[in-house]
Amino acid sequence: MTVRTALLQGTELLGSAGIAVPRLTAEVLLGHAMRVERVYLFAHPERELAEVEWLHYGRYLHERLGGKPTQYITKKQEFYGREFRVTPDVLIPRPETEHVVELALKVARDARRALDVGTGSGALAVTLNLELGAEAWATEISPAAAGVAARNAAALGAEVAVVVCDLMSTIAPGSMDLIVSNPPYVPISQREGLQREVRDYEPHVALFAGETGFELYDCIASDAPRVLRQGGWLIMELGFGSVDHVAGLLAGWNEVRVAPDLAGIPRVIAARL
């Protein structure tokens, strides 16, 4: 079995099953099975696969056909140019969440201490520490997810203090210049409408907020004035259709601004205390 044949067969299997971007997925899974970068596959199409490589590739294809996200198979996802380890204990970082970082770099460049609420993989906390140079803190209700975040910080050379708690319950008053969060915002009633990759594999504690989808926004916006120093910033990722509700929560704040994603959808909201 050559690299070319393995990719053709994998692409056909994935495409027939309705998997998105089947060729790219086949390339990523084969590269993971062979422990090589994708560019190696293009340069060595006639290379024969070792038996163990073929066995791993077959297993990865089977897992992906069953709905398991590619990132949970390879155990990695890029965020803001860095590779993060991901496990089923954490939400897979999305490119849209990078808009949180971009807005933080615009409005809170001088932040000395930053907090990521509900950190998951640690993507936001790690990135803010490395990009802003701010002292970074992160909270996480799941001990398993907190462990993933701590390991990512160590692997990427970031200094992040990870605290296991509910939202900001153990964070000292007036201790932060910047709070960021990508909170759960999917109403529980929308569970069955999610893609199976999300619904069946990603952690529900990181997805579902409650009956309305606004519950975590309400809690964060309510407690942020206690935790922020005067003049500090709160920046949150927005779920679809949440901008009006969240903007209402921040009506008494200063310099409220909403940033769209590349599709023009309101994606991030920021406000200054």
Image (cartoon, rainbow, N blue to C red):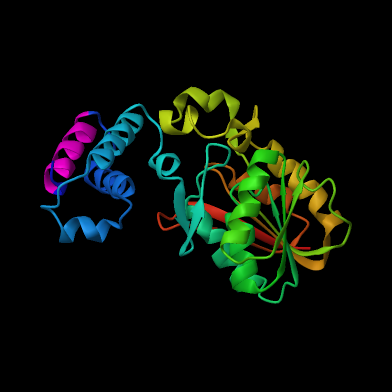
Q: Is residue 233 above or below residue 64?
A: below
Res. 127 image quadrant: bottom right
Towards the viewer: 207 or 242? 207
162 left or right, relative to 130? right
Q: Is residue 207 above or below residue 131?
A: above
Residue at (57% x, 60% y) in the render: 155
Q: Total of numbered circles in the picture?
A: 0
156 left or right, relative to 224? left
Residue at (28% x, 39% y) in the render: 52
Q: Position of residue 230 (x, y in %)?
A: 84, 67
Q: Which residues are magenta?
A: 4-16
From this viewpoint, is residue 182 visible?
no
**9 drawn magenta:** yes
Q: Position of residue 152 (x, y in %)?
A: 58, 55
Towards the viewer: 245 or 184? 184
Question: Which is the main secondary structure of the residues drawn in magenta?
Answer: helix
Quadrant in which the C terminus is drawn: bottom right
From this viewpoint, is residue 164 visible?
yes
Towards the viewer: 246 or 139? 139
Q: Is residue 95 above or below residue 92?
A: below
**260 drawn magenta:** no
